[in-house]
Image (spheres, rainbow, N blue to C red):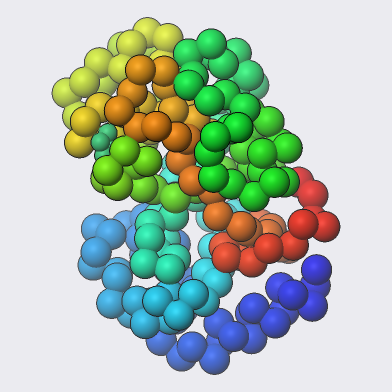
Amino acid sequence: MDDQVDHSRRRLLTAATVGTGAIGVAFAAVPFLASWNPSARALALGAPVEVDASKIEPGQMIKVAWRGQPVYVVRRTQDVIDHLGNHNGMLADPNSENSLQPEYIKASGAARARNPEYWVGLGVCTHLGCAPSSAFERRGEFQLAGVDLGADWPGGFYCPCHGSKYDASGRVFKGMPAPKNLTIPSYVIGANMHIMIGVDDASQNA
Ligand code: FES
């Protein structure tokens, strides 16, 4: 595992225009497209992207670009984590049988993550590809983009294009336009919660 991660880091360092640790921070503070140019060339080549997830506050999310697609990295609150398995009946594919993710993610169950605290997934709605918005607070009189998500909202994502809802693991609700859960890329978690997106090491467990 270490060899693979180290190799990926070397490649990242070679791509002089990519400050990988800074990407996630920059995307958290500025509009997504504003940060596109510096990394677009490397990402188009499929280079892994490293995110320092230790800087994400509980309940917050950052966006990074990988292979020309937005990737969301979410630090879930303990409250949301504790209730992930309680709303399977609301979901179209609670066990991710018909969705795209590495096998080790599927095996992680409702968390769909190597580490339940940190969720990584593509910010691409499986209906027609819009970028879902996030609303990670659970329950309450919660509204997002003028839409009432309901008192039983478990925290998650809402697609503003045609209204698809996903939970905080990217699992789509029943009756939505989106046919599948949000896709999860391969990734590994290194020291100090540095997440390397686009690197697969099936031997690493959460
Ligand atoms: S693109 Fe998300 S619901 Fe249509």
Please identify the residue farthest to the top as the structure is shown.
151
Decide: is 191 above or below 171: below
Q: Position of residue 131 (x, y in %)?
A: 30, 46
Q: In this figure, what is the number of numbered marks?
A: 0
Q: Position of residue 148 (x, y in %)?
A: 25, 16
Viewer-proximal residue among 42 and 17: 42
Decide: is 183 above or below 189: above
Res 163 → quadrant: top left
Decide: is 64 above or below 48: above
Please identify the residue farthest to the left as the structure is shown.
146
The answer to whether residue 138 of the structure is visible from this angle is no
Quadrant, the N terminus: bottom right
Q: Position of residue 7 (x, y in %)?
A: 70, 82
Instruction: Kindly identify the residue that appears in the image at 37 percent across and 82 percent down.
Output: 41
Res 113 → quadrant: top right
Please identify the residue farthest to the front as the structure is shown.
98
The answer to whether residue 8 of the structure is visible from this angle is yes
* Left/right of residue 18 with respect to residue 30 in the rendered view: right
Viewer-proximal residue among 191 and 108: 108
User: Where does ligand 1 appear, by image quarter?
Assistant: top left
Viewer-proximal residue among 153 and 42: 42
Decide: is 179 above or below 25: above
* Left/right of residue 145 with respect to residue 140 in the rendered view: left
Instruction: Kindly identify the residue that appears in the image at 79 percent across and 49 percent down.
Output: 205
Res 141 → quadrant: top left
Instruction: Kindly identify the residue that appears in the image at 52 percent across and 69 percent down.
Output: 49
Instruction: Kindly identify the residue that appears in the image at 63 percent across and 19 percent down.
Output: 85
